[in-house]
Image (spheres, rainbow, N blue to C red):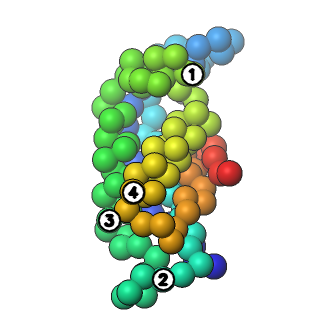
Amino acid sequence: MYKLMIETGFSAAHQLRGYKGKCENLHGHNWRVQVFVTSETLNEIDLVIDFHELKQITNEIVSTLDHKMINSVFPFTEKNPSSENIAKWIFDVLKEKLKEKQNNLKVSTVTVWESSTASASYYE
Ligand SMILES: [Zn+2]
């Protein structure tokens, strides 16, 4: 298997609903986002996917959250904007977008770092 990773990020504010503590208050993070994709095969020029293309697609997704109050962006108007839910949301949207483009690869893991020492990952 081949596994590729790209990294990007976004800056945004959020407020955790139902959290008993300071994360209940409005605050921000500079989130780092790591996307891992895997494939058993390579394309006609021996790549899993062009890094630039994967980064561009991921950036399109995270730009919906960049410099926003995440709680006011769907689906986080209903779902808690935890790093766990953000990771799953990026995973789901990316999986859908990549399905249209390439069928050789799978989204393996999306890891969202809300600080340099705390991250949440989603994988299936
Ligand atoms: Zn937070």
Question: From what the image shows, is residue 56 above or below residue 77?
Answer: below
Quarter of the displayed picture in which ligand 1 can be seen: top right
Name the element at disc 4: helix
Mark 3 residue type? Glu
Q: Quadrant of the N terminus?
A: bottom right
Q: CA distance from mark 4 to mark 3?
A: 14 Å
Quadrant position of residue 93: top left
Question: From what the image shows, is residue 52 above or below residue 94?
Answer: below
Name the element at disc 3: helix
The residue that mark 3 highlights is: 53
Residue 118, position in %: x, y? 63, 44
Q: CA distance from mark 3 to mark 1?
A: 30 Å
Name the element at disc 2: loop
Q: CA distance from mark 1 to mark 4?
A: 28 Å
Residue found 32% across the figure and 65% down from its top? 53
Camera-side mark, 3 or 1:
3
